[in-house]
Image (spheres, rainbow, N blue to C red):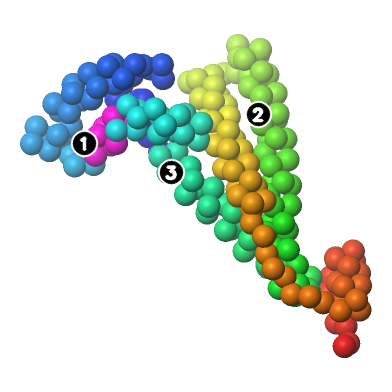
């Protein structure tokens, strides 16, 4: 995805006045009536709309995405619920007997931990590149590595914001699960502990 700041040719700390000025300048060549393309004009218009709105700009700076953060969080929570239902069913358990929102939140907490590991690895690698950049040979390789590290960090920040929001959303949801017999509860506990389905009788 094209960086919105780059689309307008402004720095990330540009003021709203700077952004509007850059938009007017870019529109002179990007507008279809001036020989530009509808796609190019739509991009700079979107960049101006997002970067001059404090809340939208904040979300964009955090996530690196023009997708509404609330929509991304809702999608992440839904995907986690789907995964939870699938995993529970694959283990031979009945999803309606379990707190699926809590199961989904647990999956996302594991994912959040993996994101943290990836973030630390990225920072470690970026530090190595910066320390030993003179040892790398090849056209533009240092800039490529630097840009790659920067994009990776931005992507992980986006993932962290979305997953953290999804966990909070799921934690606010309650599920009225069906009641089970003592026998079934014990069988479900054993099934989960063994990591596979148990076909109980009853």
Compared with 51, 46 (above or below) is below
Which label sits on residue 122?
2
- Distance CA(mark 1)–CA(mark 3): 21 Å
Compared with 8, 157 (above or below) is below
| Residue 102: quadrant of the picture | bottom right
Give neighbour class at mark 1: few <14, some 14-19, many 20+ (Cα, 10 Å). Answer: some
The quadrant of the rendering that contains the N terminus is: top left
* Residue 174 percent across, percent down from the top left: 67, 60
What residue lies at 60% left-to-right and 18% top-to-bottom? 136
Q: Which residue is label 1 attached to?
A: 41
Judge from the rendering whether residue 22 lies leftward or rightward of residue 35; answer left or right: right
Q: Which residue is label 3 attached to?
A: 68
Question: Which is nearer the N-term, disc 1 or disc 2?
Answer: 1
* Residue 43 percent across, percent down from the top left: 28, 36
Name the magenta segment's main secondary structure: helix
Q: Do the residues labelled 2 and 3 touch (CB within 8 Å)?
A: no
Give neighbour class at mark 3: few <14, some 14-19, many 20+ (Cα, 10 Å). Answer: few
Which element is circle 3 on? loop
* Residue 82 percent across, percent down from the top left: 62, 64
Say which of marks 2 and 3 sits in front: 3
Which element is circle 2 on? helix
* Residue 98 percent across, percent down from the top left: 75, 67
């Amino acid at each position: 995805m094209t960086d919105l700041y780059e689309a307008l040719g402004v720095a990330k700390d540009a003021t709203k006045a700077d952004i509007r000025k850059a938009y007017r300048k870019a529109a002179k060549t990007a507008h279809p009536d001036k020989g530009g393309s509808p796609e190019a004009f739509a991009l700079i218009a979107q960049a101006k709309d997002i970067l001059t709105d404090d809340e939208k700009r904040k979300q964009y700076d955090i996530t690196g995405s023009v997708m509404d953060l609330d929509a991304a969080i809702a999608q992440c929570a839904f995907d986690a619920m789907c995964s939870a239902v699938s995993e529970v069913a694959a283990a031979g358990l009945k999803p309606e007997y379990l707190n699926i929102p809590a199961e989904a939140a647990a999956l996302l907490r594991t994912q959040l931990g993996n994101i943290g590991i990836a973030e630390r690895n990225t920072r470690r690698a970026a530090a190595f590149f910066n320390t030993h950049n003179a040892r790398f040979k090849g056209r533009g390789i240092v800039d490529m590595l630097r840009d790659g590290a920067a994009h990776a960090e931005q992507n992980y920040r986006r993932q962290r914001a979305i997953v953290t929001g999804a966990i909070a959303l799921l934690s606010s949801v309650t599920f009225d699960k069906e009641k089970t017999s003592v026998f079934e509860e014990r069988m479900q506990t054993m099934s989960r502990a063994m990591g596979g389905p148990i076909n109980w009788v009853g």
